[in-house]
């Protein structure tokens, strides 16, 4: 209740409101995904207290999850990756003059999914955090390997490439001062490297600048002039949507608990499941309202549920959640079970703000749909320059160092190349953010045992987690192996 | 695509080899346990093994039959992309000497023109709002330190 009271203070209410609006704007602007968008807006929160900053950034995160729906429906371009599925039926509904209904049911489905997942978070998080308090450094080391393994194994077409990217991310995280001994590493005499390679400029470069470089010159899309006067579904559409919303919420919630799943998979699973159980599957792809209701509910349920591994275990499930984790760290907080003990006021205020944010998204976005549709008419050059302006601002303002802007530019070029040849980026980003924690856990464990590695297999929980991470990698290798054999036989 | 991956693997191999050599200059273990070089050393070894394996797969043709992907786009898009990178680099270079406001004014106006914007009024308004307006919001309202520059503007 104290958390709810804190979230409902005027100050935090306004932060949540600003976050929802900015997050939706980020979702609306094609090309600027939630990861880069959240990273770019972190400097907005520097002068806020940690509670306010995290409330705003969390609101930006799940606001962006909703905002992508608008472009999916109106111009058949997903504003962010998780909104791809909404294009299938949402855009068809817009072409049939039912764009308002599509956006309305998406907003309602997102609201239901978000609230349900947040209630489950309130129930699940405290006992999970209590269990995690019994973890020692070996267990945390193994748990982070599980998280990294899951993200890597789902990252792309080659397990070896995903692992190599994860290792590269871990290595980049080694630059700077050794956290245990205090000795400089990989600094090469460059003073700016003593603080390490900033995570936020890297994310801005890999996701923000790279995206701009990739989408320059893309043909402009026609915005469907859809009548937005009727945002509420008809009685028949309600009847068809409720089941889809419930099932989508369940799928999104459970997949959100698993690190590495990412935002796209819950939406696809929800859509495919809905189509499979439908009595009229031939309507999917032609404007079926269930084809919008299910993935949108799954999307927001996933977004809220993915906060559970972050808040209770300190494991980010996706690059966007990793950016949020970076925001915690920038504010001097380390997400995980100890945060529940040391700063319960902050944690519960942030969780309570999820309820508030979901309500605000529902109330705000339906009336503002017309505004978002107008923003889509902005010439791309202006969107591009505006995005880059905030990238420069964000990268510089972290440490008032031009070096970070240079890092962002270099990562933008690297990110462009990686996206062009389809090298996975998510493992690199997660390796970068988890690197210091993994190293600290490993070295602390070895110091506890006097250098004896048996500490990792004589503790049952640690051994279990290591076996899980090994199984994940083996399963991924087996899943990808038939694809490689097919490619080889094509050659 | 395969060529791109081969180049990427060679670059990665170079990075991992360099990291391995550098980490040997730090102590791997000391009296208290693993030293600063311990984790980077083993990461470099694992990275080298992974990248070498991937390179072997690529050379052997075990992965990728995708049609070739154009890394470099068409001439016009390449020019626009190049403009973005030059503008970003130039902005980073003069950000502290010139200050945020002047730098962003030139950055926004120049890049909009390079990307094909034609309305001079819209360009001017955007440049002023994006430089002076954004500076005012972030520097005075949000108290985010931004460079003023030698000219005091």
Image (tube, coloured by chain):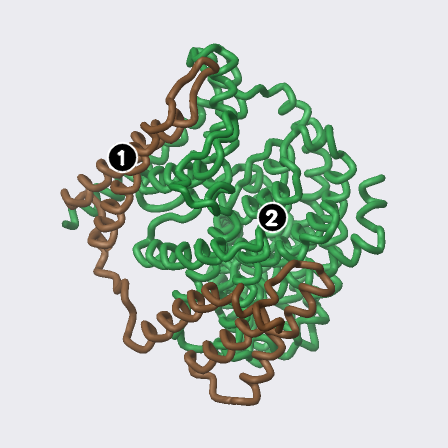
Chain colours: A green, B brown
> Which residue is drawn at the image coordinates 47% and 10% (left, top)?
A450
> Which residue is drawn at the image coordinates 66% and 29% (left, top)?
A337
Q: Position of residue A459 (x, y in %)?
A: 51, 12
Relative horizontal placement of residue A488, taking residue A308 as reference (left or right): left
Position of residue A406 relative to residue B74, above or below, is: above
Position of residue A189 relative to residue B43, above or below, is: below
Q: Do labels 1 and 2 share a chain?
A: no
Give residue A117's mark. none
Relative horizontal placement of residue A348, taking residue A167 as reference (left or right): right
Subunit bearing disc 1 = B
Quarter of the view holding residue A151: top left
Instruction: Kindly state the secondary structure of the residue where label 1 is placed.
Output: helix
Q: Name the residue under label 1.
A: B48
Subunit bearing disc 2 = A
Instruction: Kindly state the secondary structure of the residue where label 2 is placed.
Output: helix
> Which residue is drawn at the image coordinates 22% and 36% (left, top)?
B53
User: Can residue A71 be seen at all in this image of the molecule?
Assistant: no
Q: Mark 2 points at which residue?
A: A303
Q: Which residue lies furthest to the front in this view?
A: B150
Which one is in front in this view, the residue at disc 1 or the one at disc 2?
1
User: Can residue A456 be seen at all in this image of the molecule?
Assistant: yes
Are discs 1 and 2 less than 8 Å apart at CB? no
Q: Residues within 10 Å of mark 1 (few under 14, many from 20)?
A: many
The residue nearer to you, when weighing A124 against A329, is A329
Relative horizontal placement of residue A362, taking residue A143 as reference (left or right): right
> Which residue is drawn at the image coordinates 46% and 56% (left, top)?
A408
């Amino acid at each position: 209740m104290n958390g709810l009271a804190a979230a409902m203070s005027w100050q935090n209410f306004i932060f949540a409101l600003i976050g929802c609006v900015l997050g939706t704007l980020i979702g609306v602007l094609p090309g600027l995904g939630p990861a880069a968008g959240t990273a770019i807006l972190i400097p907005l929160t520097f002068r806020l207290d940690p509670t306010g900053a995290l409330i705003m950034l969390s609101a930006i995160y799940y606001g962006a999850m909703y905002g992508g729906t608008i472009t999916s429906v109106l111009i058949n371009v997903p504003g962010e990756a998780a909104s791809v599925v909404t294009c299938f039926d949402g855009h068809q509904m817009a072409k049939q003059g039912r764009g308002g209904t599509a956006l309305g049911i998406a907003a309602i489905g997102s609201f239901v999914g978000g609230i349900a997942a947040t209630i489950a978070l309130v129930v699940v998080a405290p006992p999970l955090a209590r269990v995690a308090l019994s973890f020692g450094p070996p267990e945390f080391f193994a748990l982070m390997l599980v998280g990294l393994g899951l993200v890597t194994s789902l990252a792309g077409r080659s397990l070896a490439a995903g692992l190599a990217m994860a290792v590269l991310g871990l290595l980049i995280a080694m630059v700077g001062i050794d956290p245990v001994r205090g000795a400089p590493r990989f600094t090469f005499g460059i003073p700016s490297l003593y603080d390490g390679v900033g995570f936020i400029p890297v994310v801005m470069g890999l996701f923000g600048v790279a995206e701009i470089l990739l989408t320059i010159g893309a043909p402009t899309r026609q915005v469907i002039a859809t009548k937005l006067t009727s945002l509420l579904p008809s009685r028949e559409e309600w009847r068809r949507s409720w089941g889809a919303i419930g099932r989508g919420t369940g799928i999104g919630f459970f997949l959100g608990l698993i690190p590495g799943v990412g935002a796209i998979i819950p939406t696809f699973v929800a859509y495919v499941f809905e189509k499979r159980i439908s009595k009229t599957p031939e309507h999917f792809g032609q404007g079926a309202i269930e084809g919008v209701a299910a993935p949108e509910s799954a999307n927001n349920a996933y977004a809220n549920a993915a906060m559970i591994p972050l808040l209770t275990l300190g494991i980010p499930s996706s690059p966007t959640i990793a950016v949020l984790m970076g925001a915690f760290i920038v504010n001097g907080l380390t997400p995980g079970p100890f945060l529940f003990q040391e700063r319960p006021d902050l944690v519960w205020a942030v969780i309570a703000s999820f309820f508030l944010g979901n309500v605000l998204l529902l109330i705000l976005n339906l009336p503002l749909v017309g505004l978002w549709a107008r923003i889509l008419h902005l010439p791309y050059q202006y969107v591009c320059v505006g995005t880059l302006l905030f990238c420069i601002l964000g990268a510089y303002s972290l440490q008032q160092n031009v070096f970070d802007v240079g890092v962002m530019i270099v990562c933008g070029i690297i990110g462009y190349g990686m996206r062009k040849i389809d090298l996975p980026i998510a493992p690199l980003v997660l390796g970068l953010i988890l690197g210091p924690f993994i190293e600290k856990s490993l070295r602390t464990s070895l110091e506890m045992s006097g250098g004896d590695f048996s500490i990792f297999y004589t503790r049952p929980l640690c051994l279990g987690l290591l076996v899980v991470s090994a199984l994940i990698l083996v399963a991924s290798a087996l899943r990808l192996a038939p694809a490689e054999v097919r490619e080889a036989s094509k050659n | 695509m395969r060529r791109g991956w081969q180049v990427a693997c060679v670059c990665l191999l170079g990075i991992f080899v360099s990291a391995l050599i550098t980490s040997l200059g730090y102590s791997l273990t000391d009296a208290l346990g693993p030293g600063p070089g311990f984790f980077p050393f083993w990461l470099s070894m694992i990275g080298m093994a992974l990248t070498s394996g991937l390179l072997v797969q690529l050379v052997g043709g075990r992965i990728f039959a995708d049609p070739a992907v154009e890394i470099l786009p068409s001439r016009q898009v390449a020019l626009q992309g190049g403009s973005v990178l030059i503008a970003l680099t130039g902005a980073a270079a003069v950000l502290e000497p010139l200050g945020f406001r002047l730098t962003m004014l030139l950055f926004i106006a120049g890049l909009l023109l390079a990307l094909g914007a034609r309305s001079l009024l819209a360009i001017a308004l955007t440049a002023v709002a994006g430089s002076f307006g954004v500076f005012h919001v972030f520097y005075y309202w949000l108290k985010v330190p931004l460079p003023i520059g030698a000219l005091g503007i």
